[in-house]
Amino acid sequence: MTGTHAAAGPEQATTAAGEYACARAWAALTAAHTRIAGLLSSALARACDLSINDFEILLRLDHAPAPGLRLSELNAAIPLTQPSLSRAVARLAQRGWLSRAGAADDRRGVLITITPTGRDVLRSAVPVHAQTIRELLLDPLTPREQDLLARALSRVAGG
């Protein structure tokens, strides 16, 4: 047999196998995320009229210290561009779920807080979110696999 593959030694075969393993791991992670995110999005929209991003915004603001978060602080936690996040915050504020107020220490700054109505919406969405994540991500795994997954993803996320 001729060609580069025939001349490949054990070191190159090990490298190729490792690269293939990386590709397989990435493909599995992205496929799982795509499936779960799509079904979660449908469940939140159907039950609470929320997008996944709306849910994440409300959740982050519910746990934010007083007097609220600046858009830049919220943007660090939400995977949207700054203009998209601004539009989402404006839409949620228009629905009465968020409030925006000037920052006392910066005239140009705006602080965003969740309103009591926003908290009520979040309270109705959290069980939908939990049930969907449980059914799609956790229930197919053993308790040991669940723990391993949580620890591994935490390490990958840097936490």
Image (tube, rainbow, N blue to C red):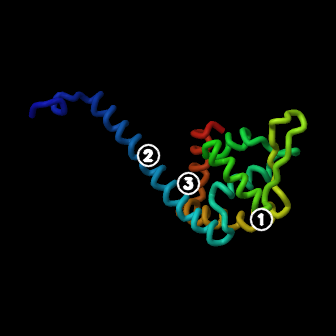
Identify the residue at image location x=16%, y=32%: 6
Label pair 2/1, CB-CB below 8 angstroms: no
158 or 144: which is nearer to us? 158
Residue lying at the far bottom in this picture: please name it: 47
* Three-letter residue code for mark 2: Ala
5 to the left or right of 37? left
Mark 1 lies on a secondary structure that is: helix
Gap in angstroms between the C-alphas marked 2 and 1: 35 Å
Mark nearer the N terminus (3 vs 2): 2
**Disc sitting over residue 25 in the figure:** 2
Return the x and y of residue 140 as percentages of the image width and height.
Answer: 53, 63
Mark 2 lies on a secondary structure that is: helix
- Specify few, some or many for label 3: CA neighbours under 10 Å numbering under 14, 14-19, or 20 or more: few
Q: Quadrant of residue 142?
A: bottom right
- Specify few, some or many for label 1: CA neighbours under 10 Å numbering under 14, 14-19, or 20 or more: few
Identify the residue at image location x=84%, y=58%: 115
Identify the residue at image location x=80%, y=50%: 63
Mark 3 lies on a secondary structure that is: helix
* Three-letter residue code for mark 1: Arg
Q: Quadrant of residue 4?
A: top left
- Specify few, some or many for label 2: CA neighbours under 10 Å numbering under 14, 14-19, or 20 or more: few
156 or 10: which is nearer to us? 156
Circle 3 is placed at which residue position? Answer: 145
Q: Quadrant of residue 144?
A: bottom right
Quarter the N terminus occupies: top left
84 or 32: which is nearer to us? 84
* Three-letter residue code for mark 3: Glu
Circle 1 is placed at which residue position? Answer: 123
Return the x and y of residue 7 as percentages of the image width and height.
Answer: 17, 28
**Disc sitting over residue 97 in the figure:** none
